[in-house]
Image (tube, grey):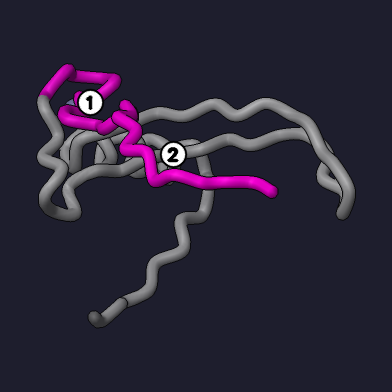
Amino acid sequence: MIKYIMEKIETERVKETHRYCDLCGTEIKLDNWDAFEFILREGHAYPESGSGTEQTVDLCPNCARKLFKYLREMGIRINEREWFY
Ligand SMILES: [Zn+2]
């Protein structure tokens, strides 16, 4: 026979409190849509496993626009579409 008791367990978790632009250092507000995270994910993914690397950059709106302007100047086509919520 097994007897169980209810035990309260105190846990800790990681919670993001602030995010800063990786280019200019400006704080990016977390309560709105002003954060731009760019992710370069490389590797191999299979149904049973996978591995790889991930590089991320957080940018404020001004620096994200600068990056996109720079990418356009390099000849990279930026896809633009409207969205509604
Ligand atoms: Zn910035």
Q: Residue at x 31, y 26 (%)?
A: 12
Relative placement, left or right, of 68 versus 31 is right
Tell me the SS state at disc 1. Answer: loop
| Rendering quadrant holding ligand 1 | top left
The image position of residue 69, as x and y in percent, is 33, 42
| Residue placed most toward the observer, 48 or 45 | 48
Labelled disc at residue 57:
none
Image quarter of residue 28: top left
Instruction: Name the residue beneath numbered marker 2.
Output: 38
Q: Is mark 1 within 8 Å of ligand 1?
A: yes
Horizontal side of 80 relative to 46 (left or right) equals left
- Name the residue located 47 percent from the left edge and 29 percent from the top edge: 56
Tag count: 2
| Residue 36: % across, % down | 30, 43
Instruction: Answer with mark 1 or mark 2, whichever residue precedes in sequence.
Output: 1
- The stretch in magenta equals 1-26
Task: Report which residue position mark 1 lands on.
Answer: 21
Indicate yes or no whether the magenta region holds residue 70.
Answer: no
